Every structure is written in C-alpha cells, then in structure tokens.
Amino acid sequence: MEKIQVSIVEDITNVREGMRFMINQTPEFTCLAIYDNAVDAYQGLLANPPDLAIMDISLPDGTGIDCIRKLRAAGSKIQFMMFTIYEDSDQVFEALAAGASGYLIKTASPEKIIESLKELHQGGSPMSASIARKVVNSFQRSDQQHKLSTRELEVLTLLSKGFLYKEIAAKLSISVGTIRQHIHHIYDKLHVQNRTEAINKIFGKKGGAQ
C-alpha cells in the first residue's frame, strides 16, 4: 500500500525530529521532508508537495499562516494541519481562513496527532477540543448577532465599551427612553437578564468589541 506522505514545518529541532520519528513509525505514513523556516517551506512544499503538511505558526522568518496563504495562491492542494502553542481566536481563524484544515495545540498526545493526520487525510478537520470550542462559540455569537437590528447592535456595542445610557443617547442622537426600549428588546431577543449576559453572549467572555 502506498504510504501517505507528510512534511513538517517546525523550527524547534527536538519537536521536529520527534514528529518525524513518530510519523515514520506509523505504518500508514512516511515523512517526506522537514523544514525549519518559512522560505524553505514555501519553496520545498511547492516543488515537492506531500499529501499532508504539519505547520507551526511562529517561524524565524515569517509565519506558517502566511506560508499557507502563499501556497494556496500558487494552487497547492496540500492538506495543512496547524501545530502550535497559539490558542487565541484571531490566530485560529486566520489560519483556517488561509487554508488550514486542522488545528492542534502542541500539548496534543502522539496518539491524538496520528489520529488527526488520518482524519485530515480522509477529508476531516481535526482540532484540539479547546480550538473546536472557540470555533463553535464564534458561530453561536455570530448567529446571536443576526437576531439584533443594526441599531440594537450599535447600542450593545457602546454598552460593552462602558458608555452610560445618556452618553449612548447623545452619540446616537436619540432619547434615553429609546435607549431603554432598545435594551429591553435586546434582552428579550437574547433571552438574558442583564447587560453583562447580553455582552457575553454577543462578544464573548472577554467583553466588548474594540
């Protein structure tokens, strides 16, 4: 049976070599190439594409996300899995938007890594549990936002930034009474009891839009 080819982009030597050993010890896989920087990775993956690529984000001369973006623009069909310490939502969504199909945190066990590579090759989108939760929460917040009118979202955004009712009224050129009506409608639509719950439901636990 033809083995699934995997290339690794990782600048930390012991992590890179450990991954290569683990992949080569798995009957279904073979490590095609390893790279420790973004420039070599771009050139190598374009010239000698594997089936799958494990991609770190932070590299000495750029980011794995930019590397994926450039490879996708060049027509690459490689299936990419991020393998990184970064768990913040911005990095996750930037990587997925660039063309990554999987996202694992570096604390993942060897068994989880191999299982995820198999899932990726079969067309899946493997993710660490914490990352999957961020993706789900983001879509849920987006769905909640669609329930609000443009004006209600404006009011809630200003509330999330700490403005008082009278300040919001002045900014939007409407009365304080109208602001109260909007807030009442927001609470009803989101099924919440107070502004903190409403802000968390739309913008997440860290608070409001910046």
Image (cartoon, rainbow, N blue to C red):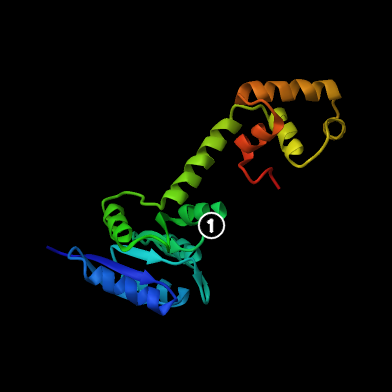
Decide: is 14 above or below 197.
below
Comparing 38 with 201, the one in front is 201
Please indicate whether residue 26 sits to the left or right of residue 56 in the image. left
Q: Residue at x 27, y 74 (%)?
A: 21
Please indicate whether residue 85 sits to the left or right of residue 162 in the image. left
Q: Residue at x 42, y 49 (%)?
A: 129
Q: Residue at x 41, y 58 (%)?
A: 104
Q: Residue 131 in the image: state x and y as whole percent.
A: 46, 50
Please indicate whether residue 125 sits to the left or right of residue 200 in the image. left
Badge 1: residue crowd in 10 Å (few <14, some 14–19, many ≥20): some
Decide: is 75 above or below 189.
below
The amino acid type, in three-letter code, at marker 1 is: Gln
Comparing 113 with 62, the one in front is 113
Comparing 201 with 171, the one in front is 201
Q: Residue 192 occupies which quadrant of the picture?
A: top right
Q: Residue 153 occupies which quadrant of the picture?
A: top right
Secondary structure at numbered mark 1: helix
Q: Is residue 197 visible?
A: yes
Q: Residue at x 52, y 76 (%)?
A: 61
Comparing 123 with 83, the one in front is 83
Q: On the image, numbered disc 1 is attached to which residue?
A: 91
Farthest left residue in view:
1
Q: Residue 172 in the image: state x and y as whole percent.
A: 82, 32
